[in-house]
Image (cartoon, rainbow, N blue to C red):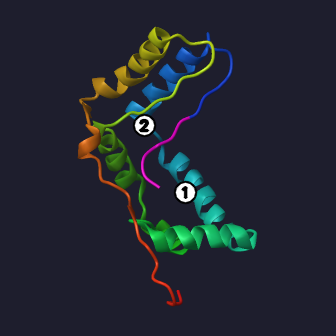
Amino acid sequence: NSGVSIEVSGFNHKLPVLLAKLADKMATCEFTDDQFERIRDQVEKSFKNFAMEQPYRHCISKLGAMTEQPTWTVEEQLAEMPNITADETRAFARSMFSKTFVESLVYGNATPADARELLEEFMAPLLSTGSTALHRSQMDAARVVQLPTGIEW
């Protein structure tokens, strides 16, 4: 529910190239108003289609909304969609990586030195925008709520 999760796989000699391009796009995050509208429409359609998902998906969503804080339901997110603008999203994107915490797992045909180099190459574009490292102790801790017995939600 918080942060960005990235998973890449494939031929290990091409992964550094893919990650470098991805990090560069994340650091600059440029998009046109038309691109924004197209993606917002796709996300809004996805939120609306959630009503037709399998019941177990609704249970998982509601359980997360009740026990994890902060969290927003699909309905709350859908209600905010008309209020989101391209300019606000651009401003958020520019500030999103101002403080960055990266946790990584590299496995397969990579040595520890390869993994460190891969992470450094990924972080370089983000750090070039003025991003500073965020220590784990500075991160907001996810809060999980225990539901009392006998209360209906």
Q: Residues within 10 Å of mark 2 (few under 14, many from 20)?
A: few
- In-image side of 96 versus 37 (left or right): left
Q: Amino acid at mark 2?
A: Cys
Q: Which mark is residue 105?
A: none
Q: Which mark is residue 29?
A: 2
Q: Which of pointers 2 and 1 lies earlier in the amino acid sequence?
A: 2
- 68 is higher (above) or lower (below) than 114: below
Horizontal and vertical percent position of residue 6:
53, 36
Horizontal and vertical percent position of residue 126:
35, 28
- 51 is higher (above) or lower (below) than 34: below
Residues at discs 2 and 1 in contact (Cβ within 8 Å): no
Hey, which quadrant is residue 80 in on the image?
Answer: bottom left
- 55 is higher (above) or lower (below) than 36: below
Q: Give the residue drawn at x 37%, y 44%.
A: 93
Q: Report helix, strand or loop for mark 2.
A: loop
Report the span colored magenta. 1-6
Horizontal and vertical percent position of residue 139:
29, 47
Q: Is residue 65 visible?
A: yes
Question: Magenta stretch: residue 149 in it?
Answer: no
Q: Give the residue drawn at x 65%, y 72%.
A: 58
Q: Report helix, strand or loop for mark 1.
A: helix
Along the line of sight, the residue nearer the viewer: 133 or 145? 145
Q: Which mark is residue 40?
A: 1
Q: CA distance from mark 2 to mark 1?
A: 15 Å
Horizontal and vertical percent position of residue 14:
61, 13
